[in-house]
Image (tube, grey):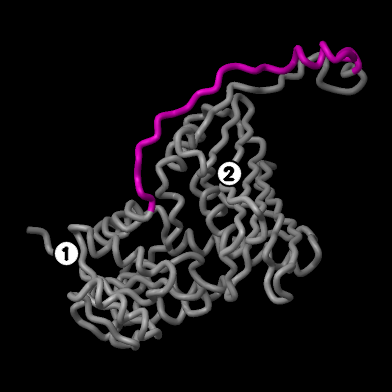
Amino acid sequence: MTEKLRIGVIGAGRWGPNLIRNFHSDPASVVVMVADQSTVRLQVLKERYPDIAVTESADEVFANPAIDAIVICTPTATHHELARKALENGKNVFVEKPLARTVAECDALVALAEKARKILFVGHIFVYNASIQVIREHIRKGDLGKIFHVQITRTNLGPVRNDVSALWDLASHDLSILQYWLGEMPVRVSAVGGRFLSNKLEDTVFATYTFANNLLANIHVSWLNPKKVREITVVGEKKMLVWDDMNLDKPVQIYDKKITIDSDQATGADRSIVDTFAGFRASIHEGETFVPKIGVNEPLAAECKAFLRAVKDPSTSLSTGYQGKLVVQALAATDLSLKENGREISISY
């Protein structure tokens, strides 16, 4: 019988119980101890899982020799300190997104993980979503052709956070998806946002990212919207694609649609040749819509299993500490653009 990976969890708030449930039910792992500052949460947890030890002290989790890995699901401001202590105590680390508050904190954690030869895994859950993985296959195979632009919308009425803005809370998902699909990160960003609910944090952000090949990606995130939307449109030279996470029957649809400008109409005055509505219509191609078959999966369960695999084989990880750092670099540059009223900011990696 294979020995189970023994896990300690720090943070039993809104998201923590989901991670506890998945790791404790997985045949390859067992949750040994959970730390949280709320005695009420710990009491509820103890009633549900009598075999899991609970404590109000994170230091008890770090010092426990029976723990192989630590899962951190606490406010972003605490990520660096908790992950640092976990790595210094020889533990593998799973930390919820975003990895940390600053690029410097991310760099320190990545270096420490390498020095300790331990896994630093970031909870970019959407790269473990079956639909997102299928889309990556179509993009990488060239089915859509050269990608021109991507439009991303992630909105809902809440939940409102008081530790990070909607940008850091929501767009961190989308930047990790773009990184996963395209294999690169944007080099410039321009963003505007609004602090309609509080004067401290943006609850609504519109950010436009430019990649080295001039691909454009626009991300709209908001906690202040009447409709829950998780949708991405990818426009390619050959075909176009829409991912709608709210559409359970057809989450991914690929459209055989494109616009072709004839070579003799491509530049200058020659464009005037197409001077009628019918002429413009002739350049538009609208074929069939293809709905790829998507396997049913629970992304969180897949993510937890991926962490367990990564502890055994680091090369299998899709969300390393380094990748988490790249996302934070893009977020930090976006924050700077927000502060400077939309000025385009170059992103260095």
Q: Number of marks in the image?
A: 2
Judged by depth in the image, the label closer to the viewer, 2 or 1, is: 2
Locate residue 50, reporting x and y percent.
19, 76
Is 317 magenta? The answer is no
Looking at the image, residue 243 sits to the left or right of residue 317; the answer is right
Residue depicted at x 66% and y 46%: 217
- Provide the secondary structure element on which disc 2 rests: strand
Locate residue 185, reporting x and y percent.
58, 52
Q: Which mark is residue 4?
A: 1
Determine which quarter of the picture holds residue 119: bottom left
Q: Amino acid at mark 1?
A: Lys
Looking at the image, residue 295 sits to the left or right of residue 74; the answer is left
Locate residue 231, reporting x and y percent.
58, 44
* Residue 348 visible, this angle: no
Q: Amino acid at mark 2?
A: Glu
Are the residues at dot 2 and dot 1 in contact (C-beta closer than 8 Å)? no
The N terminus - image quarter: bottom left
Identify the magenta region.
Answer: 272-299
Q: Which residue is mark 2?
A: 231
Residue depicted at x 76% and y 69%: 339
* Residue 279 visible, this angle: yes
Determine which quarter of the picture holds residue 327: bottom right
Callout 1 crowding tier (Cα within 10 Å): few <14, some 14–19, many ≥20: some
> Vertical placement of 100 versus 210: above or below?
below
> Vertical placement of 189 versus 242: above or below?
below
- Structural distance between the alpha carbons of marks 2 and 1: 38 Å
